[in-house]
Amino acid sequence: MLMMRLFSSVRLHGLLLLLLPGPALAQAVITVCEGEWFGWSALPRTSGACCPNTTYAWEFSSDGGVTWTPAGSTSTGISGTASLSMTGLYRRVDTWGTNIHDPQWGFCIGCNTQVTINGNYSLTVLPTVSPTISISTPQTEFCGDPGGVQFISTVTDAGATPVYAWSVNGAITQSGPDPVLVYNPLDEDTVTCQLTSSLQCADPVTSDPVGITRVDPTVTVTSDPGGYVEYGDA
């Protein structure tokens, strides 16, 4: 929304140039990830009845406001899908006018054209991050050892405070900062881990599944028809 403020004025090529001293939009600074939507919107500015309709031209500067180029929008607002090259400053240039009235009779005899610069608005576009995760275990068979089986994750671009969500057969069994899972599996269990990186602009990623086979020990008892066991023998 455009906010009216005190302003100074100068003449430029016969036009009255109004310089607004601060942000005219409520959200003047935007930070988004590459590929996300961004936008600013503002109320239209009304010209006098004797003047042409107000025109709008959004401009872009990548060098801190030294040079400006057309940003591609001639509407009251500007929006789009962010790319890295869009990082910079934006402003809206309004060309509008106020009526000039006959001093004696009061009717409109002309238009006083004015140019108002609204800005600067800042857009920062952050690059996307693509974390990776894989999991492994020292053993693919489990014999019911009391210590269970250990699954270890190997990651990239996890950030300083990642979250690991470990799942067994699709159900989360452990979630938090621990990159290792230790548990006693059942036969044919499948383990995966989802990594949520703490870096900005990083989507969660899930590892490929790792399966394990549980091999329970068995005891086989046979008899020897020709032998015997004395009392007390083991």
Image (spheres, grey):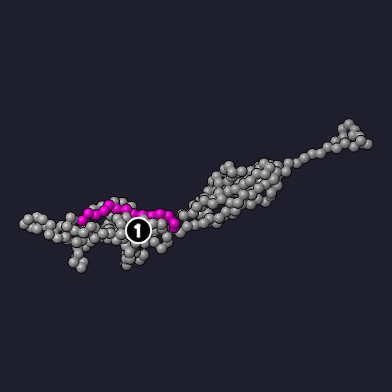
Q: Is residue 192 magenta?
A: no
Q: Position of residue 171 (x, y in %)?
A: 58, 42
Determine the residue located farthest toward the left in the rendered image.
Answer: 104
The secondary structure making up most of the magenta span is: loop
Three-letter residue code for mark 1? Ser
Which stretch appears magenta?
32-47
The total number of labels drawn is 1
Secondary element at tag 1: strand
What residue appears at the point 88 percent right and 36 percent down from the top-left corner? 223
Q: Position of residue 152 (x, y in %)?
A: 62, 51
- Above or below, comparing residue 39 to residue 149 in the picture: below
Q: Tag 1: Cα neighbours inside 10 Å, few (<14), some, or many (≥20)?
A: some
What residue appears at the point 19 percent right and 61 percent down from the top-left corner? 113
What residue appears at the point 36 percent right and 62 percent down from the top-left corner? 88
Q: Position of residue 94 (x, y in %)?
A: 25, 59
Q: Position of residue 192 (x, y in %)?
A: 60, 48
183 or 125, nearer to the observer: 125
Among the 4 quarters of the image, the one containing residue 81: bottom left
222 or 34, nearer to the observer: 34
Taking the image as shown, residue 98 lies to the left or right of residue 188, namely left
Q: Answer yes or no: is residue 37 visible.
A: yes
Q: Look at mark 1 in the image and give the residue it sits on.
A: 122
What residue appears at the point 79 percent right and 39 percent down from the top-left corner? 219
- Above or below, comparing residue 213 to residue 231 in the picture: below
Among the 4 quarters of the image, the one containing residue 15: bottom left
Q: Quadrant of the C terminus?
A: top right
Q: Is residue 40 magenta?
A: yes
